[in-house]
Image (tube, rainbow, N blue to C red):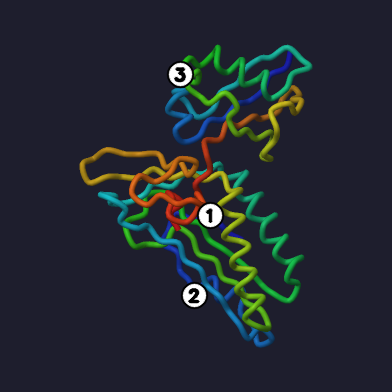
Amino acid sequence: MVYLTRHRIEVHDLLAEVQGPERGGTCVFLGTVRNDEDVTGIEYSAYDDMALGEITRILDEAQVRWPDARVTLRHRLGLIPLGEASIAIAAAAPHRDAAFAACRYVIEEVKKRLPIWKKEMHADGTTTWVDPSRPHPLTPSPLGGEGGRMGS
Amino acid sequence: MGKVSVRFFARYAELAGCTSSAVNVPTPATVADVIARIREVFPGTQALPPKPLAALNLRQVKLDQLVSDGDEVALLPPLSGG
């Protein structure tokens, strides 16, 4: 399975991997590059071999937790322009609760565990390495998660 | 003496001036010992945090993990995937 790609993510490819007649609920999560400040795009890089191992473990964990679900993902690398997806996760299960839960589990673990980094490209030509451990200057969050420079 | 491959990523690669190399460390050695050696060999990495995230042979580990000859140690900036 090609979990890391340098091409545009095609959601229908993920749907084809998880959907089936016995799975009546499908949940798709997309993380897209947003226009924080003067960001024009984000360059994603990875420790590919380790990332692939972690992705496999995360998906295996989801399979154990929700045995009737099917979950897959793509993470895009390289320069991604505003509005395009850096990550897509698709989860299908017999019912919606498991589909939502599995999808949520995978994106949260991806955020915590994947050795992937992003460099913001600014309109003035400068670049900034994103450090989620530092609060975002414009949208501080007491939780340190959503609203920080976590991207998706 | 053991030879350990080292990998740098993102901002840490900029600090080190390279993405991969190797260092020799007296064994037995820990990941922390490898990082101390890295700081000597790659002066730019002295700007690394005191206890950076590290991976040993593709798995994230604590810095007191023992390394062996031929292992690969990677220094990981704060993760920001997704």
Question: Residue beneath label 3, please?
Answer: B44
The residue positioned farthest toward the right in the image shown: B28
Give, as a three-letter code, the residue at label 2.
Answer: His
Q: Quadrant of the N terminus of chain A?
A: bottom right
Which residue does the image show at 74% across and 18% down from the upper left?
A: B29
**How far apart in space, not on screen, are marks 2 and 3 (Cα)?**
45 Å
Q: Is residue A66 above or below residue B27?
A: below
Chain letter, disc 1 residue: A
Q: Position of residue B11 (x, y in %)?
A: 44, 32
Which amino acid, by three-letter code, is at mark 3? Gly
- Please give the label number shown on residue B25: none
For the residue labelled by badge 2, is the local secondary structure a helix, a strand or a loop? helix
Relative horizontal placement of residue B52, taking residue B30 as reference (left or right) = left
Q: Residue furthest front?
A: A142
Q: Residue at x 65, y 20 (%)?
A: B34
- The percent position of residue A17, horizontal first and vertical second, equals 60, 73
Q: Which residue is mark 1?
A: A4
Callout 1 amino acid: Leu
Q: Quadrant of residue A49?
A: top right
Circle 1 crowding by C-alpha within 10 Å: few under 14, some 14–19, many from 20: some
Q: Which mark is residue A12?
A: 2
Chain of the residue that carries numbered disc 3 in the rendered image:
B
Query: Disc 2: which chain?
Result: A
Residue A149 spot, x, y in % from top left: 42, 49
In primary-sequence order, the first of circles 2 and 1 is 1
Q: Is residue B28 left or right of residue A22?
A: right
Residue at mark 1 shares a chain with residue at mark 3:
no
Viewer-nearest residue: A26 or A136:
A136
